[in-house]
Image: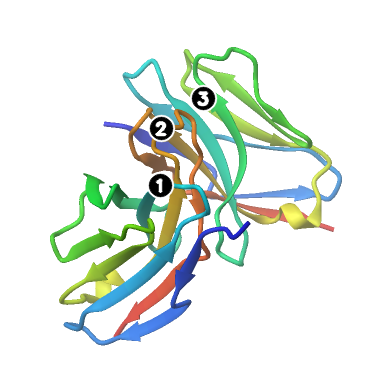
Amino acid sequence: DAGVTQSPTHLIKTRGQQVTLRCSPKSGHDTVSWYQQALGQGPQFIFQYYEEEERQRGNFPDRFSGHQFPNYSSELNVNALLLGDSALYLCASSLLEGRNSPLHFGNGTRLTVT
Amino acid sequence: AQTVTQSQPEMSVQEAETVTLSCTYDTSESDYYLFWYKQPPSRQMILVIRQEAYKQQNATENRFSVNFQKAAKSFSLKISDSQLGDAAMYFCAYKIPGNQFYFGTGTSLTVIP
């Protein structure tokens, strides 16, 4: 049973560029959430996708956008990269209807903006 | 606003000893869930234990147990018989049904051989 997989593992981009991160959820899960984890901090919620729609969004600018595909996989796009976007980006999957359904995380993508 | 506070940035414990990590949260909700996640250097967040707020009984998973004090909004994690593999960042998290998770800033646990 494959868990949550994310690609790429590491990424280096230049300020102003655009980046796309990818995530495949755990088998059987229908909801994908994205989190940003700055160095030394806890994960911060970016947004959540369910049935190919953005269901909830955290306090992140419109430069952060996403998509969920019919097979439940998801992408996170960040435009006009800033130095402050350097962080570990975590994808997590879960079941929307599971009241206490925990998040299952991938290994993350380490994004460095120079 | 939902907030989760972990007041201990770093903790250390001798191998085979017991350590308790603290977590407090702020909420006006009555129906919610609490979690402890572990993040080793491999970066993957791993679920350690979960607690439903409506359950008075404290959750236990092998060497891991919680002390859930609902009135005090406290949710501490106790690790018994600490092992070298327990060394990691530990994050306390809170969620209400159908909503996002809120994480604390983490506690870095060192296990001393």
Amino acid at the residue labelled 3? Ser
Earlier in the chain: of badge 2 and badge 1, it is: 1
x, y (%) of residue B7? 49, 40
**Disc 2 to disc 1, C-alpha distance:** 9 Å
Are tags 2 and 3 found on a single chain?
no
Q: Indicate which disc residue B74 carries.
A: 3
Task: Write down the residue under mark 2.
Answer: A97
> Dot 2 lies on which element?
loop
Q: In this view, does B89 lie above or below A8?
A: above
Q: Indicate which disc residue A30 carries.
A: 1
What chain is tagged by disc 3? B
Q: Are marks 2 and 1 in contact (CB under 8 Å)?
A: no
Hey, which quadrant is residue A110 in on the image? bottom left
Q: Is residue A90 left or right of residue B42?
A: left
Whether residue A57 can be seen here: no
**Disc 2 to disc 3, C-alpha distance:** 26 Å
Query: From the viewer's perspective, is the residue at label 3 or at label 1 nearer?
Result: 1
